[in-house]
Image (spheres, helix red, strand yellow):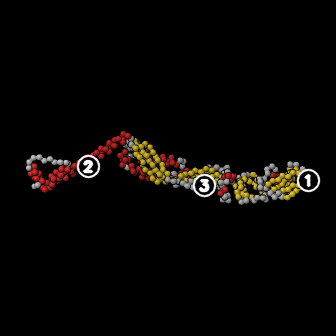
């Protein structure tokens, strides 16, 4: 006989011939011949070196443990003293009772939706995060959710969490801001066979994400193609001179002829216009020569007009001086004054006749 003691925080299993024959709680006990005592701390994990089914057959054992049965399509959240401790996968899990208070929350993960009963603050816990898929839709985006290849819903901006299971999840996202598309380097023949290159730009916005992403493949390429075709149609029916005169009307034509088609793509065309019209080198040289000739002709006309006005002014002045001797003398004095301004010194030689001559100039 051997006397043993089981403390408050312990559970004792009496083993004889490699079999557990009884369970001992807190207290002092006598062990018979060939019996051994195995002590287990209730605060620690349940031992796995004994068959649980055999232990459950022992009298009083079931009242000492918590048994959690987790199905293949479920998980269990374990809360120790009301705080999250860990996550349990499928299987049978055993915990000691008495010393610590545990709660168990079973959750079905066969579907992707996470119920509100699961605290979102726990999603970042490592053991729980393993069972969760996370997707983020930025503030400027919207998304389409596909479950097992089937479209299910439109996702607005935010962070989404789904259970990780056998279902496949895909999210297609699109930028909902105003976007710019450049149709550059379009080489087009005009009606008079002039080859020009056009750079066109437009601004658009997605208004129906389902039409843009689900009903149409690569909506940007389709938008580019329809702009390209309409540019070729418009420019191809005009001569080069007509195009240069009406280039500001291109945007109106494009808006009028593409709005309905673009709406079918789930888009809204906001603005569009021609950035550049690039002419071939020889055509550009010819047009420059024409422009220079036009400007020279305009300059000659202006010069002739100014010369005519100047001559007319001189004629009018001459008529006035002819009719008024005093005005003629004032004009003479004006020119003498201008001449005197350019003379630093005057040397006078001769007799008194010079003074008389000056007097005759300035005195009537």
Give the residue at mark 2.
Answer: 302
Tell me the residue at 43%/50% (across/down). Answer: 273
Secondary element at image label 3: strand
Q: Which element is circle 1 on?
A: loop
The first of marks 1 and 2 along the sequence is 1
At 53% from the left and 52% from the top, the residue drawn is 175
In the depicted view, which residue is nearer to us: 22 or 164? 22
- Residue nearest the observer in this picture, 234 or 92: 92
Q: Earlier in the sequence, mark 3 or mark 1?
A: 1
Labels 1, 2: front one:
1
Tell me: 257 left or right of 82: left
Left or right of 277, for residue 210: right
Residue under label 1? 1
Q: Residue at x 40, y 45 (%)?
A: 277
> Picture coordinates of residue 5 (x, y %)?
85, 56
Find the distance from the CA under tag 3 to the CA under tag 2.
72 Å
Residue 33: horizontal and vertical position, in percent? Answer: 91, 51
Which residue position is annotated with label 3? 159
Q: Name the residue rendered at 37%, 49% in the picture.
A: 246
């Amino acid at each position: 006989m051997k006397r043993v003691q089981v403390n408050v925080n312990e559970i004792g299993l009496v083993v004889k011939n490699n079999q557990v024959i009884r369970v001992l709680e807190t207290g002092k006990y006598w062990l018979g011949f060939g019996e051994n005592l195995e002590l287990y701390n209730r605060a620690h994990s349940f031992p796995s070196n004994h068959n649980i089914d055999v232990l459950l057959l022992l009298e009083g054992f079931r009242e000492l443990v918590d048994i959690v049965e987790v199905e293949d399509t479920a998980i269990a959240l374990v809360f120790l003293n009301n705080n999250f401790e860990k996550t349990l996968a499928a299987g049978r899990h055993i915990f000691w009772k008495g010393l610590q208070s545990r709660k168990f929350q079973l959750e079905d993960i066969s579907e992707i939706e996470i119920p509100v009963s699961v605290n979102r603050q726990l999603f970042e816990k490592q053991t729980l995060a393993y069972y969760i898929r996370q997707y983020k839709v930025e503030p400027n985006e919207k998304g389409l959710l596909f479950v097992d290849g089937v479209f299910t819903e439109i996702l607005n901006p935010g962070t989404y969490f789904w259970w990780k299971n056998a279902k496949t999840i895909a999210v297609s996202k699109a930028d909902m801001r105003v976007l710019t598309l450049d149709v550059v380097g379009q080489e087009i023949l005009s009606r008079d066979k002039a080859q020009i290159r056009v750079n066109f730009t437009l601004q658009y916005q997605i208004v129906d994400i389902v039409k843009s992403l689900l009903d149409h493949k690569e909506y940007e390429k389709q938008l580019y193609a329809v702009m390209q075709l309409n540019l070729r149609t418009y420019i191809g029916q005009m001569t080069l001179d007509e195009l240069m005169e009406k280039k500001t009307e291109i945007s109106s034509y494009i808006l009028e002829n593409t709005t309905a088609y673009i709406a079918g793509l789930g888009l809204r065309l906001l603005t569009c216009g021609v950035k550049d019209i690039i002419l071939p080198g020889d055509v550009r040289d010819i047009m420059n020569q024409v422009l220079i000739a036009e400007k020279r002709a305009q300059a000659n006309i202006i010069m002739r007009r100014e010369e005519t006005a100047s001559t007319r002014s001189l004629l009018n002045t001459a008529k006035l001086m002819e009719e008024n001797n005093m005005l003629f003398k004032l004009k003479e004095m004006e020119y003498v004054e201008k001449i005197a301004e350019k003379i630093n010194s005057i040397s006078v030689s001769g007799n008194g006749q010079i003074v008389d001559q000056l007097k005759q100039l300035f005195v009537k």
